[in-house]
Structure formats: C-alpha cells, structure tokens
Amino acid sequence: MTATQQNIVIVGASIAGHGLANELLATLPKSHRILLIDALGFAFWPIASLRAAVAPGWEEKVTVPLTNEHVFPAGSPHQVIAPNKVVELRENSIILEHPFEGSTEVPFYKCVIATGSAQPSPMRPSGSWTEQEYIGALKKNQEDLKKAKKIVIVGGGTVGVEFAGEARALLPNTSITIVHTDTSLLSPTPLASEKTTQEASSWTSPPTNPKLSTALEKVANKQKLELIFSDRVNIPQEGSVAPTSADWDGSFGLQSGEKTLTLASGKKIKADYVFLSVGNKPNSSIVQKTDPSAITSGLVAVDPYLRVVSKNDNSPLGKNYYAIGDVSSAPGAKTAWNAGLSAKAAAVNLVNEIQGKSLVRYDPGTFSGLFVPVGPADGAGSLTIPYLGTWTVGGGMVKSAKGKALFVDKGFAGLFKGSKKVAIKV
Ligand SMILES: Cc1cc2nc3c(=O)[nH]c(=O)nc-3n(C[C@H](O)[C@H](O)[C@H](O)COP(=O)(O)OP(=O)(O)OC[C@H]3O[C@@H](n4cnc5c(N)ncnc54)[C@H](O)[C@@H]3O)c2cc1C
C-alpha cells in the first residue's frame, strides 16, 4: 500500500464480494486498494453443497482456500483478509476480530457489505469452521445417508427438492418423503403478506412459476419421491424432546433409530434421517447491531444505487456503505446470478464516486432462470427472456446447463484470478 492509498473494504468474499473484487481489479484507480474480508479461511460454493453432502468425491470440489495467491494477481496491492470476522461497523472504519497490519481498526473510503445469508451445514459451513472441518462434515453426511432407510425432507423448496434428487441418485431403493407447506413443490402460491403489505417482517422468495412446480412434481413422481403438500412438520423446540424418545427431537440428519414426526394435520410419519431445508436467513446482524433503522424485512436497506440507507438521519452507515448480494434489499430473487449483477453495478458506482461521476441505478433486468436439478441427470427449469416470455425447460437441458457440473468448473473456479491457478474437474 502507498501512503496515500485508500481502502475499499468488502465484507464477505463469496459470490457477491469476490465478484465485486474481480470487477474492481480492472477498473479501480491506483489511488485505492481492495481489502476482501471473510470470516472463513476458505471460499465455498453453495450451489454444489448438496451434492457434496451426498456424493463421495464432491466434497473436494466445493472449497478453495481464500489466499492472496488464489484471489489477486501477483504484485497487486489488494489483500485478502481471511479468516477474520468484521465485528463492528463505524462511519469511516470497520473493526476486525483479529488485527490486520497491526490494528483491528481498518479505515476505508467505502465499505461494501456482502455478508450473504445463513443456512445450517451441510448447505453452508458454520461461521467458525476450517476448510477441513467443513469437508469432514460433508463426508460424515455422505456416510450417514448410506445408513438411512426412511428419509424425510422438511421443506419442498429448491434446496429440499435438489437434496431429494441427490439422495435418490445414490439410494435407488430408500424411502424419501418431502413434506411441504405449499400446494406443490417450490412456492407457486403468493403468500398473504406479499399480497397485502409492502414490508414483511422477514424476507420471503417471490412466487415461482406454477408450470415449473408441475414439471418438478412429474420428475419427483418418476423418481418415486413421496410428496405431502399443504402440511408442515412440527419441529420441536431444542431440548423439549429427549434424544432417547420414540418421537423426533428436531435434530438434523441420521437419527439414533426410527423416529416419529408429527405433522400439523395430525398425521404421523416415520424417519431415520431428517433433512431440514426451511429457508435462508439474511446475515445482516452486524448492520442490525449498528443501526436497526438500516434493516428492512431482515435485509440491509439500499437505495436504487445500492448504497445503504437508513431511516435514522444520523446513521453511521448513511454515507459510505453499500450492500450487495443475498443480504441486500436490492430487487430480485436471492440467487448467485443476482449477486453477480449487484457486484457489477456496485463496482461501477464505486469507481464513479471516486471519479466524481454520476451514479447508475441498479436494474437486474427481466432475464431470469431457475434450473432445479433432481439428481445429476434430471430436473426441470424455468427461463424468463425479455420480450419472449417465460419458458419451462426439461431435464435434458437442466442436466447439460447445470445438473452435471453445478458450475464448479467455470462459475466457482472461474472466480479465482490469482497467480495460483484454481482448476476443478468434474
Ligand atoms: C444449497 C444452496 C443451493 C443454491 N443453489 C443455487 C443455484 O442453483 N443457483 C443460484 O443462482 N443460487 C443458488 N443458491 C443461492 C446462492 O448460493 C446465493 O444467492 C449466493 O451464495 C449469494 O452470495 P453472497 O456472496 O451474497 O452471500 P454468501 O454466499 O452467503 O456469502 C457470504 C459470505 O460472507 C461471509 N461473512 C458473513 N458475515 C461476515 C462477517 N461478519 N465478517 C466477515 N465475513 C462474513 C461468509 O463467511 C460468506 O463467505 C443456493 C444456495 C444454497 C444454500
């Protein structure tokens, strides 16, 4: 760093944060350097985490150590700071858990929050794990799953459906049941709160294309996945049911024997392996702690330029912060595609601010795709193309576009622009 160089701090080095660093590599003036911070010492690829939790060998394809050599070209002034957690946000600086360049306080010109969302392992690693601990958890799940005779999946969104497909590919004769609150797979029915209010207490996915739900149901029936709709599994509070009980105690994964799960309808079903896929939670707690007025529906509130906004005029976050990816209230579904689009848009606006130019409004556009693999060789998808409308696509296209490689080779490995090349083979 030169004496006058200013920092662009990016908190979170996953699809949004790492994508932003890549965009800035080409455009950031020499007066500034990037500090890319992550609580984890490794990058992970959530899109393939379900396969990695089921199929032996895949646990080696979903993580890469977060180092300068992997992320930044040789001789660049930019720095990866990982593992290191941002614990506090101030108007012109952030506070780290561990010192960097001799201090836990790091000053910045602008700070971008890209802290994403949280889901339990195996979908995502726990915040304090090492790479080896995450790989170990994935391997353990692979072993546990092989012992299962009756699998119950709680939640029939994309994660539940994808997990069912991965499990079926490995276990052709095991009973697999998905229990889902909606009338079909994914979320074809708009929620009442979306119809009546602009601001819900927490963020929920927009409704999905009903034709995609129907297509996925057909694939599920072909794969002999049992589907229970318009019902929900009662999840007991932690500690309220003894692990020795014949009733399920709410725990994830392989059970100590066959357990009884009770549904809201009163129906009872048996399982010796329970997979919980009941949604994403935005990782917005550091913003919430600094200024609750900068949170909307659980997300970090941003203006049309992706700058953090607050209802509090004196907010320390009101001038120098941006938010992108899953944690941001920017329009669009919480997907890797949109995380990448918001990273591109934030890069343009950060450079425009440095150069004193006008900011550009963020527009995710109308192109969108939702491809849901049900195992490596089948699935269904929905594609919305401007002026052409929305199309449902079949298993062959989902397999070749996504299901076979889950983008680990190009999407994940392709993020790393450093001197040490990253190659992931499928
Ligand atoms: C199982 C699964 C399957 C998915 N499949 C698809 C798919 O097929 N297609 C698709 O488009 N999307 C998919 N998604 C969604 C996609 O993965 C997310 O939209 C994407 O990861 C969002 O990226 P992000 O960078 O905003 O956040 P995240 O990927 O959540 O990353 C946030 C990062 O911030 C770090 N962090 C958090 N707090 C701090 C802190 N205080 N200090 C430092 N670092 C911090 C975390 O360690 C993490 O690395 C899937 C998600 C899951 C879980």
Image (tube, rainbow, N blue to C red):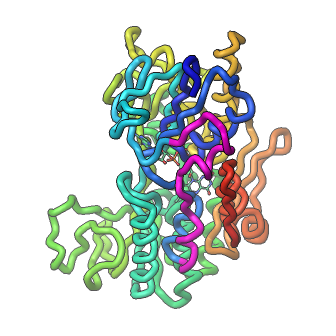
Residue 386 part of the magenta segment: no
Task: Tell which of 253 and 121 is nearer to you.
Answer: 121
Compared with 298, 426 (above or below) is below
Q: Which residue is nearer to you in this view: 106 or 212?
A: 106
Q: Is residue 349 visible?
A: no
Where in the figure is residue 392, as x and y percent of width and height?
A: 75, 58
Quarter of the image with the N terminus is: top right
Q: Quadrant of residue 271?
A: bottom left
Name the residue: 53% across, 38% down. 36
Give the percent coordinates (x, y) of residue 381: 70, 60
Which quadrant of the structure image shows residue 352?
top right
Quadrant housing the C terminus: bottom right
**258 is higher (above) or lower (below) than 84:** below
Left or right: where 26 falls relative to 117:
right
In the image, farthest residue toward the right: 388
The answer to whether residue 242 of the structure is visible from this angle is yes
Q: Residue furthest bottom?
A: 173
Q: Residue at x 26, y 82 (%)?
A: 256
- Residues 207 and 5: in front is 5
Residue at position x 68%, y 21% in the image: 351
Q: Position of residue 63 (x, y in %)?
A: 54, 61
x and y percentages locating residue 8 in the rendered image: 56, 27
171 vs 138: above or below: below
Q: Is residue 55 left or right of residue 278?
A: right
Identify the image quadrant of residue 399. Answer: bottom right
- The mark tally for this picture is 0
Q: Is residue 58 magenta?
A: yes
Residue at (64, 42) in percent of width and height: 19
Which residues, given as a range, are shown in magenta? 55-80
